[in-house]
Image (tube, grey):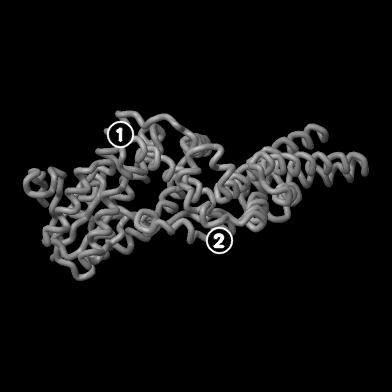
């Protein structure tokens, strides 16, 4: 393994490279800054040099489509996203897009432009393009499953707050971004202060991308890999030294523990509340039983409906939230937000301009309420938040009356 920084007159614009020979393939890892014009020039010069017969980029399929296809978001099946329970990763992607747009407005360059340039130039020269990064949704889910309940709450609150942050990105953060990673930067201080999150964001992806390079050489003998400078050292080490089979490693790093269909804490709480209502009927008569049942319905339906109302959902979406929330014990694992969001999407079907305006609308609170895609996400999230608060308040009220 050899490492070198090519001088600017070579055409690589002084960007750092690492060259590795393995299994008959020569890999050139080109480290870039995601907010640098020099990195774009370096990428174009490297591809145009004619030295490479394949190009790999630090992108997954979803981010590649978003960068190279302006209509990618317009082709999204929002109903499928809601039905498959992928609203949270989708909301995280919106937060990332909003952060990128703020950077673009401040710096005059779209973050990741060098990756887009690599993809476009590879296609123009008929070179095979390898997308080697892990899906953002998988990374987000692996991050959440590795955090404590409190850290998950802080992370989600931080991501949500970043959606509406209008302050300029600090010079310090921009310098970190030049040397680091877009996903890490978007999580801000939380990423730097949480070792488990850093490992999932950076180290796991270093392993994954190095394995993908070995897995997808596709007969190429000279591969150019365009990656953020923050991944250069880790990827070089794993590419040179990792002995596990690439498919085995990528499979392990893509695995997300399946949630139990019936979360035990939710099941225990539901049994406690339902048991309390039944005991109230048995021991205190119909009046106490009805009072306890009314407590449950009023709090869960009322707060779930309030959540949908605060999201400015359609009146029937609010009704769907209020009706579905008290029935939670009969469908554990299916959040009431799914019903209210599906109703919202059907009643106020997002139009083509809504998808095209997502990156701009996600930057302001008014945009979230104006854009029908964003509003459906809000209906989902706020309905579930209201329902959750209603469950705990009604549970406490029922137990208080029984005690």
Most foreground residue, 69 or 233: 69
Q: Judging from the image, what secondary structure is the residue with disc 2 in?
A: helix
Q: Is residue 108 left or right of residue 197?
A: left
**In the rendered image, the vertical position of residue 346 relative to residue 106, given as above or below:** below
Residue at (12, 62) in percent of width and height: 50
Residue tagged 1? 174
Query: The C terminus lies in which quarter of the figure?
Result: top right
Q: As displayed, is residue 57 above or below residue 371?
A: below
Number of the label disc, if any, that sits on residue 80: 2
How many numbered badges does the structure rendering display? 2
Question: Disc number at residue 133?
Answer: none
The answer to whether residue 73 of the structure is visible from this angle is yes
Q: CA distance from mark 1 to mark 2?
A: 36 Å
Q: Residues within 10 Å of mark 2 (few under 14, many from 20)?
A: few
Residue 126 location (% of width, % of height): 22, 68
Q: Earlier in the sequence, mark 1 or mark 2?
A: 2
Side of 14 where 152 appears, left or right: right
Q: Are marks 1 and 2 in contact (CB under 8 Å)?
A: no
Q: Residue at x 59, y 42 (%)?
A: 369
Q: Which of the two residues, 392 or 116, is positioned nearer the viewer here?
A: 116
Asked if residue 333 can be seen in this view, the reply is no
Residue pictured at 64% horizontal, 49% vertical: 337
């Amino acid at each position: 393994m050899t490492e070198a920084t090519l001088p600017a007159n070579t055409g690589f614009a002084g960007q750092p490279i690492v060259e590795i020979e393995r299994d008959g393939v020569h890999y050139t890892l080109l480290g870039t800054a995601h907010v640098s014009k020099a990195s774009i020039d370096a990428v174009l010069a490297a591809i145009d040099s004619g030295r490479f017969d394949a190009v790999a980029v630090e992108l997954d399929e979803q981010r590649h489509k978003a960068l190279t296809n302006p209509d990618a978001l317009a082709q999204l099946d929002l109903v499928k996203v809601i039905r498959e329970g992928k609203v949270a990763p989708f909301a995280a992607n919106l937060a990332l897009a909003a952060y990128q747009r703020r950077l673009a407005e401040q710096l005059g360059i779209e973050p990741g432009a060098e990756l887009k340039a690599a993809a476009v130039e590879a296609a123009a020269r008929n070179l095979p393009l390898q997308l080697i990064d892990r899906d953002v949704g998988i990374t987000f889910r692996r991050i959440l499953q590795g955090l404590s309940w409190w850290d998950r709450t802080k992370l989600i609150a931080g991501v949500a707050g970043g959606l509406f942050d209008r302050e300029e990105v600090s010079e310090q953060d921009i310098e970190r971004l030049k040397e680091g990673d877009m996903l890490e930067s978007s999580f801000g201080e939380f990423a730097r202060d949480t070792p488990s999150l850093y490992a999932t964001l950076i180290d796991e992806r270093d392993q994954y991308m190095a394995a993908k390079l070995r897995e997808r050489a596709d007969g190429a003998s000279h591969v150019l890999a365009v990656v953020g400078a923050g991944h250069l050292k880790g990827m070089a080490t794993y590419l040179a030294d990792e002995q596990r089979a690439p498919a085995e490693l990528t499979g392990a790093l893509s695995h997300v523990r399946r949630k139990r269909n019936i979360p035990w804490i939710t099941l225990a709480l539901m049994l406690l509340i339902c048991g309390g209502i039944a005991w109230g009927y048995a021991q205190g008569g119909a009046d106490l039983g009805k009072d306890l049942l009314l407590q449950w319905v009023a709090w869960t339906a009322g707060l779930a409906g309030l959540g949908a109302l605060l999201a400015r959902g359609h009146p029937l979406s609010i009704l769907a939230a209020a009706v579905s929330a008290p029935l939670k014990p009969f469908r554990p694992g299916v959040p009431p937000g799914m019903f209210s969001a599906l109703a919202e999407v059907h009643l106020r079907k997002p139009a083509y301009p809504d998808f095209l305006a997502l990156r701009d609308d996600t930057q302001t609170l008014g945009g979230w309420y104006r854009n029908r895609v964003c509003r459906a996400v809000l209906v989902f999230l706020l309905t579930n938040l209201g329902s959750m608060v209603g469950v705990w308040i009604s549970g406490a009220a029922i137990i208080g009356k029984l005690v």
